[in-house]
Amino acid sequence: MMTGEQYVDSIKNINMEIYMFGEKVESSATNPILRPSLNSVKATYDLAQQPEYEDLMTATSHLTGKKINRFTHIHQSTDDLIKKVKMQRLCGNKTASCFQRCVGMDAFNALWSTTYECDEKHGTKYHERFKDYMLKVQEGDWTVDGAMTDPKGDRGKSPSQQSDPDLYLHVVERRPDGIVVRGAKAHQTGITNSHEVIVMPTIAMREEDKDYAVSFAVPMDSKGLYMIIGRQSCDTRKLEGSTMDVGNCEYGGMEALVIFDNVFVPNDRIFLDGECDFAGMLVERFAGYHRQSYGGCKVGVGDVLIGAAALAADMNGAQKASHVKDKLIEMTHLNETLYSCGIACSCEGKKTSSGNYLINLLLANVCKQNITRFPYEITRLAEDIAGGLMVTAPSEKDFRHPKLGPVIEKYLKGVDSVSTEDRLRVLRLIENLTLGTAAVGYRTESMHGAGSPQAQRIMIARQGNIEAKKALAKNIAKIK
Ligand code: SF4
Ligand code: FE
């Protein structure tokens, strides 16, 4: 396993084509806006080195018998699925942001079983290839981005019906040694902090969309691959040199639009090509794993937000007010309900024919459906407790100013035992989590990440088995 420092060096050594604010960025390791997002992924390496987290952060490879980072593991039991969720809660606790490495882990596990079942039906050789790829991932302790979401253009049209054929990523050329692909993937979490990217289709495909039913892996310095970084609210505060105003200056997340401009993929890195009947399975399983993931990561960040709200109340001297106590209880109840969903879909997981474990898809979708709601309520309650100062507090520069500083110190003071600076630091953290850069990962990503709410409702409808429930009702009501 790599140490955090070795990981950072390994990313620095990849010559990626990254753009932000119309300019080329050298590396996420050296850019002040992107560096916190690299630090979050680095935490997944650092934590794996610490003996107290060994049980959650590492696993034994079923391929080599070696100790590996759990983020590169193929789940071998329901216990592995549960530990995955607990690991994500831990990482959320430590970073208070999106630590990005889960998308690759979820892609590994979705591809593991899908390639196996595709080979069984079509006589293809994808699973052995993918196994070889996983050996490289585990040996190199790589971070791999999982790229699913195509731009999609006109949502009323299928991939091949779009007036611009590139709105879904597709194969444009087939050669004896591989394929050439063109298109883009949107909202790519952690892409600048990854060694490689695994591309998957974004929806179930029909025969006419064959060229769009493609999955493969390429390194991040592949020719024709480049990224345009998405802005996050308050992102340029990271350029101001103030730790206070950023709220969480060490960690963050990142998303980018990734362009595949005629990228070549050699044969040994293709895991699906034209078997459109397996595109839907790959989407459903990847989404299922990632919906389980949210029952860990968002809960971990939620813990930090609840803690920050409680601190803000303490610092105001409001901690004994019954409504404050009740709001903290409500936030905890909502957060632990999300965790319960993450654990439940893991406990109810089942072995696939390929040998790895898949979560219970119905419960994973229920988990994510709740995630589209509860963090919003937790956020609302945190803002309620924090008070308006969370968005009206002066800057750190004012706080350090010889004339203004003492005035701010005097008038924005809470209880005697707490400094004004500490009070402002907590409020900025709440601002960061609810409105700032971390709000991308905690709020809006709770809505749209791993699929927007309607995507889960479709899966809940499919998995809910209403017919069986009708039969139960008929039986009790004595209806023949
Ligand atoms: Fe992991 Fe959560 Fe970020 Fe997805 S949103 S990559 S599950 S931390
Ligand atoms: Fe996500």
Image (spheres, rainbow, N blue to C red):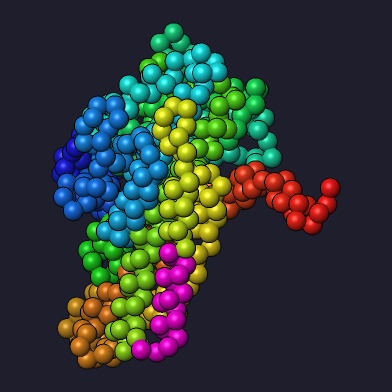
Residue 327 colored in magenta in the image: yes
User: Residue 228 placed where, x, y %?
Assistant: 40, 42
Closer-to-camera residue (469/480)? 480
Residue 322 lies in quadrant: bottom left
Closer-to-camera residue (59/308)? 59
Q: Is residue 350 visible?
A: yes
Closer-to-camera residue (67/32)? 67
Q: Is residue 436 visible?
A: no
Q: Quadrant of the N terminus?
A: top left
Picture residue at 44% right of the left edge, 19% below the top? 126
User: Residue 405 placed where, x, y %?
Assistant: 21, 84
381 sits to left or right of 49:
right
8 sits to left or right of 394:
left
Picture residue at 45% right of the left edge, 58% below the top? 340
Overall secondary structure of the magenta section: helix
Q: How many marks?
A: 0
User: Residue 377 placed where, x, y %?
Assistant: 50, 69
From which residue to which does the magenta span run?
A: 320-336
318 sits to left or right of 179:
left
User: Residue 420 placed where, x, y %?
Assistant: 24, 83
68 sits to left or right of 323:
left
Q: Residue furthest top?
A: 176
Picture residue at 43% right of the left edge, 76% below the top? 329
Q: From the viewer's perspective, is residue 276 above or below residue 362?
A: above
Residue 8 colored in magenta in the image: no
Picture residue at 38% right of the left edge, 48% below the top? 82
